[in-house]
């Protein structure tokens, strides 16, 4: 078990070190044209992406200011995928590391070999994911695994498309907000120009795009409104069909609470996912 823990730490450090390098390097991509040139130079085509090419993709802190001026539809879509996909993939990979930690500790618990250090790690994760950790039992581990899990890439990209207008909305460009999350602290957000006079919310701003993605996934993994989403995700994973189009569609149906228009929002998301064949990205889950 010590070997597994050491291996996990090495993976975490290697991953963090690699992506920190990319984040600092992303300062060179101040124009969508530079992004386009980089990927062409490295022979990376988002429509024919290979798993071994993901490590060469860049994590942008912000969307280039000139991206809003890009009107050519197909080019706009490709650049947006190149911006959003690596952020979503990285966040999912980090969640996988947390999930594997829980699974490894659960195995030790089942053998009555859980250690104090394991309990400390579980408490830290349970606190982060807003779960009661007073009783360490099978139900606790079940709830932890139900919350600490990835979001299908197709849904994450689809919702980013809707909420950010393909990355060209004011909230995306000025606030690094890909998912239109609300805040009632006016200092933390941007006020919608057509906000209902009776409402007082703002769209939350983030220091960088990755923070927006992390906040979005954390919301789906913890908020009571998305309990059914998490249950469907758990069941489809147990049946080992989590990446199938049918499974993704079942998960999608549980996201009505994401917008005030509810069922209409799900219908819109379904159209976005289908017409752009976004489930092709789920093989990288």
Image (cartoon, grey):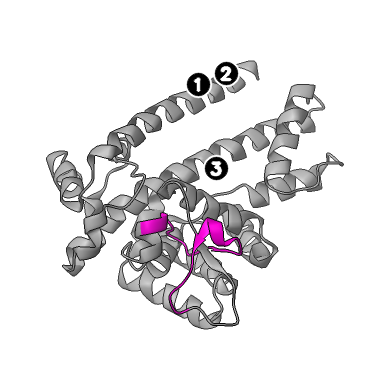
Q: Which residue is mark 2?
A: 6
Q: Position of residue 267 (x, y in %)?
A: 46, 80
Q: In the figure, is residue 137 to the left or right of 280? A: right
Res 56 visible? no
Residues tagged 1 and 2 counted as in contact (Cβ below 8 A): yes
Residues tagged 3 and 1 counted as in contact (Cβ below 8 A): no
User: Which residue appears at 20% of the width and 69% of the height?
Assistant: 73
- Secondary element under disc 1, as helix, strand or loop, is helix
- Secondary element under disc 3, as helix, strand or loop, is helix
Whether residue 183 is in magenta: the answer is yes
Q: Quadrant of residue 168?
A: bottom left
Residue found at the far front of this picture: 187
User: Which residue appears at 43% of the width and 78% of the height?
Assistant: 268
Q: Which mark is residue 10?
A: 1
Mark 2 or 3, nearer chain start: 2
Q: CA distance from mark 2 to mark 3?
A: 18 Å
User: What range is drawn magenta here?
Assistant: 174-194
Q: Position of residue 153 (x, y in %)?
A: 43, 55
Q: Position of residue 66 (x, y in %)?
A: 21, 57
Q: Position of residue 60 (x, y in %)?
A: 33, 44
Quadrant placement of the N terminus? top right
Mark 3 or 1, nearer chain start: 1
Q: CA distance from mark 1 to mark 2?
A: 6 Å
- Secondary element under disc 2, as helix, strand or loop, is helix
- Asked whether 76 or 8 is in front, the reply is 76
Q: Which residue is mark 3?
A: 95
Q: CA distance from mark 3 to mark 1?
A: 16 Å
Q: In the figure, is residue 66 to the left or right of 272? A: left
Whether residue 182 is in magenta: the answer is yes
Residue found at the far right of this picture: 135
């Amino acid at each position: 078990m010590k070997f597994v823990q050491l291996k996990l730490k090495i993976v975490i450090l290697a991953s963090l070190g690699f992506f920190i390098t990319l984040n600092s390097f992303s300062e060179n991509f101040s124009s969508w044209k530079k992004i386009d040139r980089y990927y062409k130079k490295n022979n990376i085509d988002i429509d024919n992406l290979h798993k071994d090419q993901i490590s060469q993709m860049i994590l942008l802190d912000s969307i280039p200011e000139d991206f809003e001026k890009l009107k050519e539809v197909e080019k706009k879509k490709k650049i947006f995928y190149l911006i959003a996909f690596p952020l979503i993939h990285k966040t999912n990979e980090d969640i996988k590391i947390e999930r594997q930690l829980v699974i490894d500790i659960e195995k030790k618990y089942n053998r009555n070999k859980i250690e104090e250090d394991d309990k400390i790690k579980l408490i830290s994760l349970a606190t982060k994911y807003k779960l009661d950790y007073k009783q360490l039992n099978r139900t606790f581990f079940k709830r932890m695994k139900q919350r600490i899990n990835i979001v299908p890439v197709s849904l994450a990209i689809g919702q980013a498309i809707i909420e950010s207008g393909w990355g060209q909305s004011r909230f995306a460009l000025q606030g690094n907000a890909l998912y239109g999350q609300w805040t009632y602290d006016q200092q933390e957000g941007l006020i919608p120009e057509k906000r209902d006079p009776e409402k007082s919310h703002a769209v939350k701003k983030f220091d960088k795009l990755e923070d927006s993605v992390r906040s979005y996934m954390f919301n789906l993994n913890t908020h009571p409104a998305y309990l059914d989403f998490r249950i469907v995700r758990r069941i489809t994973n147990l049946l080992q069909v989590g990446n199938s189009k049918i499974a993704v569609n079942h998960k999608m149906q549980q996201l009505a609470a994401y917008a005030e228009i509810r069922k209409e929002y799900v219908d819109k998301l379904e159209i976005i996912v289908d017409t752009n064949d976004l489930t092709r990205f789920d093989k990288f889950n």
